[in-house]
Amino acid sequence: MSPSFYRTIHKREERNTVEKWSGNAALWIKRHAAKIMVSLAVFVLLFTSFLMMGTDASSTTPAAASPQEQVITVSAGDTLWEIAKKYGNGSEDIRFVIYLIKDRNGLESVDIIPGQKLIIPSI
C-alpha cells in the first residue's frame, strides 16, 4: 500500500464523519423532540411552582388589638417566657401562653427584638 492510499481513506472518513454528524443532529432532534418537550414542561412547572410556593414567613401584620388585649413594647432583655409569665393568669401553662402570643402576633420563632410591639391575647 502506498502512503497516498492511506491518506485518501482517512480523508474520506473525515468527510463522511462531518456529513454523518450534520445529518444526525437533525435526526437526533426529531427522535428526542418529545423527551425534550416533556423535560422542558416539567422544568417550567417546577420552576413556577417554586415561585408560587409560600413560605412560613408571615407577610401580613396581625389584626388590631381588641379591647380585651394589651399591646406591649418589647424591652431589651425581654423573652417570650418572661412576658408570658408576667401577663399569664397563673393557671395556664407558660408554654401554652407563649404559643398564644406567638400565634396572635404571627411569630415563627421565639425571637423578639427590643422595640417590637406585641399583642398579648386575653387569657
Image (tube, grey):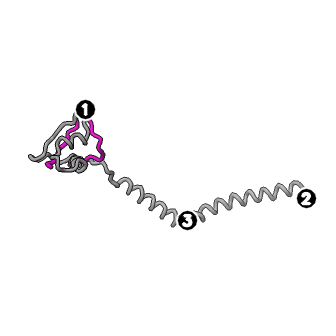
Q: In which quarter of the image is residue 32?
A: bottom right
**Kind of residue indicated by mark 1:** Ala
Marks 3/2 in contact by CB < 8 Å: the verdict is no
For the N terminus, the image quarter is bottom right
Residue for point 71% across, 59% down: 17
Image depth: mark 1 or mark 2 in front: 1
CA neighbours of label 1 inside 10 A, class few (<14), some (14 to 19), many (20+): few
In terms of secondary structure, where does tag 3 sit?
A: helix
In terms of secondary structure, where does tag 1 sit?
A: loop
Residue for point 45% across, 58% down: 43
The reply, left or right, for residue 4 in relation to residue 11 is: right
Image depth: mark 3 or mark 1 in front: 1
The magenta-colored residue range is 104-123
Residue for point 17% across, 46% down: 90
Residue under label 2, please give it. 1
Q: Distance between the residues labelled 1 and 2?
A: 95 Å
Q: Which of 32 and 46 is in front in this view?
A: 46
